[in-house]
């Protein structure tokens, strides 16, 4: 019953963007190389945002160009996060064929995060779709489970946004547990409904490990039939508004479990853990992975 | 609503990893806090030689205070041998945990006994103190640092003698945090099939970040008694930086949110875990909630 897992690494975007000190492009490119060498086949590798908003990502074009030069012919899926059409154009100009863009399901979080109403965001998505008809656009839905301001997100609101975006030709969606508050039951319930209503879309999940439910929720998603799961190397990340809070699920911890359980991930755990330990040695950040902190193997 | 009994083992498994002596008043303050938060089952200490674990040299004092103050709480202590059982009986403790490792080499390394010696020692304890309710902690059930993993059938075979001896409750321990949810389900299914009357607990370490997922897998396989430690205090003396047990407050949060009845007040138990970090700053804490700044606007 070897279930296949399409693992998606998002550390070079969601992890790096939470790091204060600039990480030199050489290190970013090396970590991306290491991840690909470990067997990662899909990666959110940077973000084309205003360098004023997130100075860490000012080298997005360089990181993309250098990575495509080395790995462009390997059939790996590399994409970047973009907040708007401007970013999407920059991503395309750098050579990417796919981008992800974000809308928060919760109105108040969308307003706080990107200062737009959900409706304005959907219109922005439509403009992006029209401006770049050849670019693959996938939609990441923040606060898909809970919101810091509004509490539990009604599934109906998730469905509404998917319906609108699907009408624009979007086929891939990511449900993000932005503040790491989803529990496994909530994940199962939401995913079951979304898959029932939209059986033909490609669905990803993106779970934060803020409350130590990251692995349990990701497993719940897999067992509910969603095989595209996101995580960040080392669990690097956090929340700019909550100092100390854990970041994404740690890729290497997730891969360890999945490989042991007999899922096929195609990823070499030892190589991935080595990459996480290297990352921790060169970047000062918040690492919520557990194995990355173990000094000596306990055996 | 399904009831889950949280078995707090921090005062034993957490404290024993701390080098500097924690004053008995501090230990009692934490135990008090656990009871106030709604925890009803606590492994409070271990009756071991103070030479082996100086941290727990105040075991008698702690147990006496606990029994005096909270007659309705289910307190347990770990006992390694007959002498420990004698002390437990002398101070009026009725429930004790006795450890044996499924792995012969781990049993030797941990308590310097063969499997046969471990079995005989328990037999003697049972005969000498029949009034003691003994829970068998089966260490390395899910994997051993020396011998790797064992098939579920090995767990079942090993337990037979103990069940025949009259043991009614067993805690399956993931000593090095190597269990995965699939394995937890497989082993539990086999043990439950072989011994349908046996009461089961699980004790999962969070070393590899699978603590919550494995404990949830155990619950969904029918186990209702889950061990954990406040703050995730613990670790491994042989692996610096390694996480300890699953954090009580993290598990309570998840279960409460999922609609289980733990009887534990999450804000109180979280506040207590944060207090513990201040009281025992040298500990290794693997919990995640304790790191969140409560005043941050991202978190309600």
Image (cartoon, grey):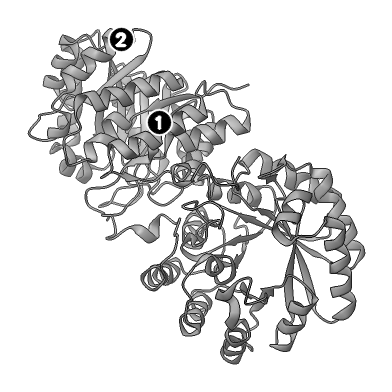
Q: Position of residue A128 (x, y in %)?
A: 84, 74
Q: What residue did someone put label 2 on?
A: B69
Q: Mark 1 lies on which chain?
A: B
Residue A41 image offset from top left, x and y in percent = 60, 74
A220 vs A40: above or below: above
Using the image, name the chain to which the residue with label 2 belongs. B
The residue that appears at 59% across and 76% down in the rendered structure is A57
Classify B72 as above or below A217: above
Q: How crowded is mark 2: few (under 14 residues within 10 Å), some or many (20 or more)?
A: few
Q: How far apart are marks 1 and 2 (CA)?
A: 19 Å
Image quadrant where residue B78 sits: top left
State the residue at coordinates (59%, 26%).
B260
The C terminus of chain A sits in image quarter: bottom left
Near mark 1 (Cα within 10 A), the count class, few <14, some 14-19 or many ≥20, is many
Classify residue B175 by image quadrant: top left
Asked if one can make out residue B94 in the rendered structure from this viewpoint, the answer is no
| Residue at position x 53%, y 51% in the image | A242
């Amino acid at each position: 019953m070897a279930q296949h897992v399409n693992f998606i690494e998002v550390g070079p975007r969601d992890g790096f963007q939470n790091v204060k000190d600039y990480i030199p492009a050489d290190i970013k490119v090396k970590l991306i190389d290491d991840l690909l060498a470990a067997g990662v086949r899909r990666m959110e590798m940077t973000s084309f945002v205003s360098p004023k908003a997130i100075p860490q990502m000012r080298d997005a074009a360089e990181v993309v160009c250098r990575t495509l030069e080395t790995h462009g012919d390997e059939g790996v899926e590399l994409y970047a996060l973009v907040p708007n059409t401007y970013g999407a154009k920059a991503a395309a100009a750098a050579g990417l064929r796919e981008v992800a863009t974000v809308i928060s399901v919760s109105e108040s979080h969308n307003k706080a995060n990107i200062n737009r109403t959900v409706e304005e965001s959907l219109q922005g998505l439509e403009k992006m779709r029209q401006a770049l008809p050849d670019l693959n656009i996938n939609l990441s839905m923040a606060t898909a489970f809970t919101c810091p301001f509004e509490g539990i997100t009604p599934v109906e609101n998730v469905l509404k946004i998917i319906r609108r975006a699907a009408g624009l030709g979007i086929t891939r969606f990511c449900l993000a547990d932005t503040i790491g508050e989803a529990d496994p039951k909530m994940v199962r319930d939401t995913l079951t409904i979304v898959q029932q209503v939209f059986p033909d879309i490609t669905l990803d999940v993106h779970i934060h490990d803020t409350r130590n439910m990251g692995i349990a929720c990701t497993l719940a998603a897999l067992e509910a039939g969603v095989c595209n799961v996101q995580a960040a190397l080392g669990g690097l990340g956090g929340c700019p508004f909550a100092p100390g809070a854990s970041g994404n699920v740690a890729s290497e911890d997730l891969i360890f479990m999945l490989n042991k359980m007999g899922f096929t991930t195609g990823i070499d755990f030892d190589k991935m853990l080595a990459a996480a330990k290297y990352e921790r040695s060169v970047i000062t950040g918040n690492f919520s992975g557990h194995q990355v902190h173990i000094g000596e193997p306990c055996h | 609503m399904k009831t889950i009994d949280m078995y707090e083992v921090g005062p034993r498994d957490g404290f024993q990893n701390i080098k500097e002596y924690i004053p008995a008043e501090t230990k009692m303050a934490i135990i008090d806090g656990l009871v106030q938060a709604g925890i009803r089952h606590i492994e409070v200490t271990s009756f071991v030689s103070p030479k082996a674990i100086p941290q727990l040299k105040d075991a008698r004092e702690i147990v006496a205070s606990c029994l005096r103050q909270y007659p309705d709480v289910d307190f347990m202590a770990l006992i390694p041998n007959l002498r420990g059982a004698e002390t437990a009986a002398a101070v009026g403790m009725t429930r004790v945990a006795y450890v044996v490792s499924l792995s012969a080499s781990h049993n030797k390394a941990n308590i310097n006994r063969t499997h046969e010696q471990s079995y005989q020692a328990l037999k003697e304890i049972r005969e000498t103190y029949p009034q003691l309710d003994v829970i068998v902690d089966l260490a390395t059930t899910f994997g051993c640092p020396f011998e790797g993993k064992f098939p579920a059938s090995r767990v079942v075979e090993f337990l037979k003698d103990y069940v025949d001896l009259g043991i009614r409750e067993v805690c399956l321990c993931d000593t090095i945090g190597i269990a995965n949810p699939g394995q937890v389900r497989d082993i539990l299914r086999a043990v439950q099939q072989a011994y349908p009357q046996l009461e089961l607990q699980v004790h999962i370490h969070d070393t590899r970040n699978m603590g919550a997922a494995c404990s949830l897998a155990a619950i969904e396989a029918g186990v209702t008694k889950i061990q954990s430690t406040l703050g995730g205090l613990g670790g491994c003396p042989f692996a610096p930086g390694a996480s300890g047990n699953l954090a009580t407050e993290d598990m309570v949060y998840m279960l409460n949110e999922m609609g289980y009845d733990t009887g534990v007040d999450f804000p109180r138990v979280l506040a207590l875990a944060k207090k513990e970090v201040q009281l025992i700053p040298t500990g290794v804490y693997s919990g995640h909630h304790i790191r969140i700044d409560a005043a941050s606007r991202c978190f309600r």
